Amino acid sequence: MTLRKLALTLLLGTSLTATAQADDLDRPRIRHVLLISIDGMHSVDFINCVTGLPGVNGGMPYCPTLAKLKRSGLDYLDAQTSRPSDSFPGLMAIVSGGTPRTVGAFYDVAYDRALQPPAKTTGNGVAGGSCVPNQVPTGTTTEYEEGIDLDKSRLDGGADSGIASIDSMRLPRDPAHNCNPVFPWNFVRTNTIFGVAHRAGLRTAWFDKHPAYAAVSGPGDGTNLDDFYSPEINSPSVNLPGVKTSTGVDCTKLPDQSALMAGGDYTTSFANIQCYDQLKVNGILALIDGLTHDRMKPARTPNLFGMNFQAVSVGQKLIETTLNLKGGYLDSFGTPSVPLLGEIRYVDSAIGSMVADLKARGFYDDTLIVITAKHGQSPVDSPRYTGITKTGPVTTSPATILDGAGCLPSSESPSNPTGIGPTEDDVSLIWLDASCTTAQAVKLLETTSPASNNIAGIGEIMAGRQLAQLFGAPGLPPQNDPRTPDIVVTPNIGVTYSGSTKKMAEHGGFAHDDTNVIMLLSNPKLPALTIGTPVQTAQVAPSILKVLGLDPDALESVRIEGTEVLPLIGGIFSDRDRDR
């Protein structure tokens, strides 16, 4: 017998000749799943921090919590996020088991040809407009980020850091449904693990960065989450009395007062982002302790709960000029800069506090901890970062080229002085108006930015059947998908269209650094196995349902797209009904 077969036999806790019933009785039971997204964290970041790197921490591992979890966990080396690798489709893949093809989430700011504008201009500039029931739609940019908050200048979004903070007047409207506003959970087309678990009587909770991310609740009335908490990350930073990070930093007075005084949000400071993330960490600890996230009421510890971390993403991207600090990496091996190293260590410590609390409350043995990421970040080789400059080599973007020819809707136009602008990071998603055909637009991109003088840094142009293959053909229903872009441009590695001077990386694209992320499933009953089989973050959703004793096929995207449970995990845990 090979070592691999022997490991699998021992893992299942039964001999090859045991009966199916005995096999099931011997398998461990999972009553809780803690799902964590460390936004931006690559697989190589995980490998480096649990193995060690020359010149970092004396060559010793610098993630003690993750290293311990790996010793009783399944480590999937080749895990790929959604494409595009934006937070919105990335998160929805994790919780729905689907790609934008079925879920309909391409980006947190995207476009829908079948919807009409919001009644009121959003906080980020998507213009309000008219909507008449059953009228032929003209299309609108869709925004599901801080711009739909009641008040994006407040940490609580204007209300409760939850769904009450969403301003329905700033939501796109559906003329086919009496011009009702499309709430985030109904913008998503297919159901989620939270909806399936909630319907089965399990308690659910999720904490994220915008109230709009209540989208994880899935279609319905937004109540598939028993506890939802999303303090607004893009609100101006404020001191956080009583908050202390897992590494001992007192946030009563934010450690980086220069960012606070400048009116910067939490993403503008390497130090302050940790205080922001700690708000959600404290909420998770409250849930484990049998309370609501604010510790105001007793509540059963959720069966399915989790949060996202923003600290690593900020550490990879930020140039904090006021303190003369640069994040990112020192080389193509993924050696972290000093600021990025601090963010990774903070996240490891914060997860350690969760693990300690699970053990203290007696939940650790029957909890599966799932750690992955909505997206990666590009480039890892930081010197290859290439933003738009006046002198080149990249001086423009695909959207700017097409806007100059009048090909874009006003709400997507980079020349609209009050608009939110096009969907461009290290990818460019293009929705055209009726003035230009797709063929004309592609030709214009090819001639304006040819390989010999690539002023837009274009790597690949996807359109027509090549694009329909991934997402469905763009157009109006019922034959076509109103959300599929007409054109997707993936730039050369390192090229970013944001034009920001405060960043040295970005995400959203299709490149390896954008899409290859950490994937670790840990439980004390698991052996340490490293799995090289290519997997998708979308496989997390059916896997979570499987280990909770629920049917993965209850997820609509799983049925439609044939999303499989992650290798090995499906045969490890018992399928018996769980005690709730």
Image: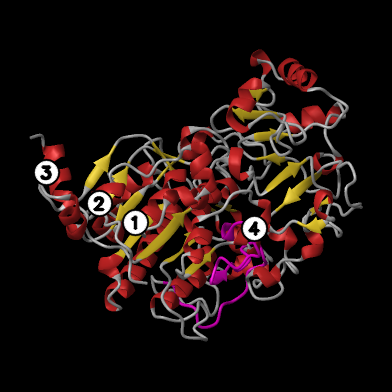
Picture quadrant of residue 322: bottom right
Task: Mark 4: give few (<14), some (14-19) or many (20+) Cα within 10 Å.
Answer: many
Relative to 70, is 380 on the left or the right?
Answer: right
Residue 90 percent coordinates (x, y): 54, 47
Q: Are marks 2 and 1 in contact (CB under 8 Å)?
A: yes
Q: Which residue, given by chain and number where applicable, does mark 2 sit on?
A: 572
Q: CA distance from mark 4 to mark 1?
A: 25 Å
Q: CA distance from mark 3 to mark 1?
A: 22 Å
Q: Which residue, given by chain and number where applicable, does mark 4 sit on?
A: 185
The span picked out in magenta is 216-245
Most foreground residue, 165 or 102: 102
Q: Which residue, given by chain and number where applicable, does mark 3 sit on?
A: 16
Relative to 479, is 281 on the left or the right?
Answer: left
Picture quadrant of residue 403: top right
Specify the quadrant that holds the N terminus. top left
Q: Which residue, given by chain and number where applicable, does mark 1 sit on?
A: 547
Residue in the image at 40% along x and 35% along y: 332
Nearer-N-terminus badge (2/4) = 4
Task: Mark 1: give few (<14), some (14-19) or many (20+) Cα within 10 Å.
Answer: many
Q: Amino acid at mark 2?
A: Ile
Task: Mark 2: give few (<14), some (14-19) or many (20+) Cα within 10 Å.
Answer: many
Q: Is residue 353 above or below residue 402?
A: below
